[in-house]
Image: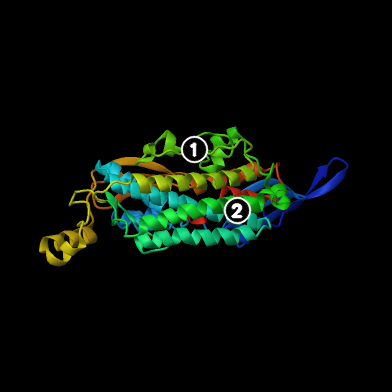
Amino acid sequence: MADLTQIKNVNNGDRETKELILNMGPQHPSTHGVLRIVLQLEGERIVDVDPVIGYLHRGTEKLAEDFTYTQIIPLTDRLDYLCQPSNNLAYVRAVEKLLGIEAPERAQYIRVMMAELARISGHLLACGAMPMDLGAVTVMLYAFRDREMVLDLYEMITGARMHVSFCRVGGVREDLPVGFKEKANEFCKVFAQRIDDYERLLGANRMFLKRTKGVCSITREEAIDLGLGGPSLRGSGVDWDMRRDNPYEIYDRLKFDVIVRENGDAYDRWKCRMDEMRESVKMVKQCIDQMPEGPVKTDLPEVAFPADKKQVQSSMEALIHHFKLASSGFKVPKGEVYASIESPKGELGFYIISDGSEKPFRMKVRAPSFVNLQALRTLAGKAYLADMVAMIGSIDSVMAEVDK
């Protein structure tokens, strides 16, 4: 890495300029976490970008080696902590693939519905925070107001507002509570109108448009070469979404549009997220309407806890079954597997190697925030110092997922 105190003279035609190495972060408010960026500047123009990560010291992948397969679920909540149900879903699908089992149909609908609520939650923060970083504060306040509605639905289903740990291998923890359907329908009705309000606030905001349109562009070829995902990929004109192109759970039964923009700039990535929230609302409504009755856990006693907690209080066999699973976990056949989903930020995948015990031998997380962060280097020679704020906000990396 370059010496941070380095200033060198550069001949630029008839005049002499100085090249400056500047730190942005890790305490800078617009880096959205402990991200340090070493910038090489020539005046206000960015010559080189060096993202420096590792300040969170998470160690999730190593911790997983000493946790049972069920105990790992709360660890996944803390990767992208804005979209926890998506993390849960990607992980349990990998374990289910090793076991060769599938969640019941009703559980799959609940999982997908929560994953789309998670997409709305994550996109709301991204679509509010980026304008705020650029000077348009009002949208952030409204975004947090509406995100509270999503967190209220989380709390109603799981009892927790953030770290829900709701998915289980072979299903979900429990069925939906009484009255949830009405609350979810009310949210869909209200929120669909609120998205229009956001666009009215920013659609004619000259400051926001000048700071984002034509700024921090990523070409289609660059997006593919870097392996970007989510709005960072589709905003550059790449028509790829795993929910449609590699469907999982019950996504092939839902009708939705894949949002693709062509310019690849900060504005298009922001607009992608806005339009994707509209599609997520449609999917949540479809899940509620199509959801069948039935069990929410697989009927495999060696994997799933007793379906009725009252049995644990009245049956010695059920109590032993519950205690054994909670204390020792369940064994997974030897093998290795990779499973992934379309998380709000792109392809989130888990690669697991099993040695036949109750704990994984190795686990690797394919974190989209980590991959998308590479896009910062495409700024070199393209943008000015002030544009870095728009770039960070528009690729929407969460540092807890980067420092996995």
Q: Which mark is residue 322?
A: none
Q: Quadrant of residue 157?
A: bottom left
Residue plotted at (22% across, 53% down): 304
Which residue is farthest right? 14
Q: Of callouts 1 and 2, which one flags the residue occurring earlier in the amino acid sequence?
A: 2
**Residue 48 picture location, percent across and down:** 67, 46
Residue plotted at (59% across, 56% down): 128
Distance from the alpha carbon under mark 1 to that under mark 2: 21 Å
User: In the shown orientation, is residue 371 left or right of residue 12?
Assistant: left
Where 107 falls versus 239 (above or below)?
below
**Residue 379 picture location, percent across and down:** 66, 44
**Residue 25 picture location, percent across and down:** 62, 59
Q: Amino acid at mark 2?
A: Asp
Q: Amino acid at mark 1?
A: Asp
**Residue 330 picture location, percent across and down:** 22, 52
| Labels 1 & 2 near each other (Cβ < 8 A) | no
Residue plotted at (39% across, 52% down): 114
Closer mark to the observer between disc 1 and disc 2: 2
Q: Which mark is residue 257?
A: 1
Identify the element where label 1 is drawn. Answer: loop
Count of numbered marks: 2
User: In the shown orientation, is residue 174 left or right of residue 131?
Assistant: left
Which residue is farthest left? 316
Foreground of the two, 11 or 41: 41
How dense is the environment of label 2, judged by Cα within 10 Å: few (below 14), some, or many (20 and up)?
some
Where 277 falls versus 264 (above or below)?
below
> Looking at the image, can residue 33 be seen?
no
Q: Which mark is residue 197?
A: 2
User: In the shown orientation, is residue 305 left or right of residue 9?
Assistant: left
Residue plotted at (28% across, 44% down): 105
User: In the shown orientation, is residue 318 left or right of residue 235?
Assistant: left
Foreground of the two, 333 or 65: 333
